[in-house]
Amino acid sequence: MTQGLFISFEGIDGAGKSSHIAALAQAFRDTGRVVTLTREPGGTPLAEKLREMLLHDGMDALTEALLAFAGRRDHLRCVIEPALARGEVVLCDRFTDATFAYQGAGRGFDRQVLSYLEQLVQTGLAEDPQRLRNPDVTIWFDVPPRVAAQRLAAARTPDRFEAQPEAFFERVAQGYADRAVADPERFARIDSSRDREAVAAQVMEAMRTRGLLGADLAGAHTHE
Ligand SMILES: Nc1ncnc2c1ncn2[C@@H]1O[C@H](COP(=O)(O)OP(=O)(O)OP(=O)(O)O)[C@@H](O)[C@H]1O
Ligand SMILES: Cc1cn([C@H]2C[C@H](O)[C@@H](COP(=O)(O)O)O2)c(=O)[nH]c1=O
């Protein structure tokens, strides 16, 4: 049976992730893979309710972290693990790196507590209960906060996180950079300050170099 593949997409708000997830899903479908497209916070009815609170209600950093991990547990149990067990490709818009970047680096919340929650929430799920479920690959859209802010200003009304000052996003960006240094094999860094075509080409190249999509697909699906 085909092995499941778990890919997450990360970056500061406005980095340009969403523009490329659907294209990558199509590229995998073209190879015959079944794709589950999902997101965090969210991904299940329960976790989507928690997402609404996280994005719109006032709370401290510990409460943010607890809501993020509570939603993640439900998401893992109900959507991600079953899809991986069926051999599907799971494409997830944000996962635990976002908690370390936003609550850890952005809000300054204790990284050791986050690591404890990560261990608690992301184990006891697979056939091997000790296995800590994390993405196989994380596509990190790296962009200067000023560029992301300019993109978002033109796009939509900001939520609680998008309304944060540039200094917050400088810290979040550094949080992602730290995660990438700690796990270089998992992270594929994409220079997301470039135009959409160049960003899409980098995403496909990152897949190809990992042997996850055929070489003939490296230049395909570069249009939204
Ligand atoms: N390479 C690019 N160049 C210029 N504008 C872009 C580029 N990529 C995306 N955009 C625009 O920037 C805005 C934010 O993009 P998008 O919603 O894909 O970002 P995101 O990373 O998914 O953000 P968030 O995580 O906050 O939802 C959109 O208006 C999108 O059209
Ligand atoms: C998973 C996760 C997310 N966040 C933040 C990051 C973003 O500002 C929003 C999600 O919005 P998007 O448009 O869907 O990207 O939530 C967070 O603070 N902590 C997390 O664990």
Image (tube, grey):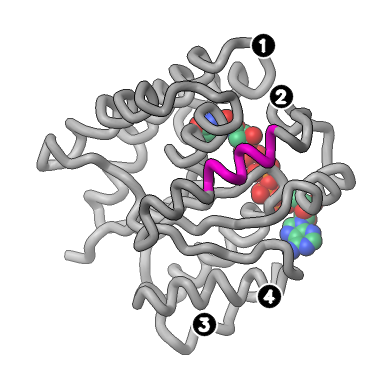
Compare marks 1 and 4 and give the one earlier in the sequence. Answer: 1
> Of tags 3 and 2, which is closer to the observer?
2
Quickly name the residue at label 1. Answer: 58
- Give the main secondary structure, helix, strand or loop, of the magenta stretch: helix
- Mark 3, other Cα within 10 Å: few <14 / some 14–19 / many ≥20: many
Compare marks 1 and 3 and give the one earlier in the sequence. Answer: 1
Compare marks 3 and 2 and give the one earlier in the sequence. Answer: 2
Q: Is residue 161 above or below residue 147?
A: above
Q: Decide: marks 1, 2 in contact (CB < 8 A)?
A: yes
> Of tags 4 and 3, which is closer to the observer?
4
Indicate the amino acid at tag 4.
Ala
> Of tags 1 and 3, which is closer to the observer?
1
Residue 74 visible here: no
- Mark 1, other Cα within 10 Å: few <14 / some 14–19 / many ≥20: few
Residue at 36% over, 50% down: 135
In the figure, is residue 114 to the left or right of 217?
Answer: left
Answer yes or no: disc 2 within 8 Å of ligand 2.
Answer: yes
Quickly name the residue at label 2. Answer: 160
Indicate the amino acid at tag 1.
Gly
Q: Position of residue 80 (x, y in %)?
A: 34, 42
Quickly name the residue at label 4. Answer: 198
In the figure, residue 163 lies in which quadrant? Answer: top right
Residue at 53% over, 37% down: 101
Magenta span: 168-176
Indicate the amino acid at tag 2.
Arg
Secondary element under disc 4, as helix, strand or loop, is helix
Residue at 10% over, 41% down: 128
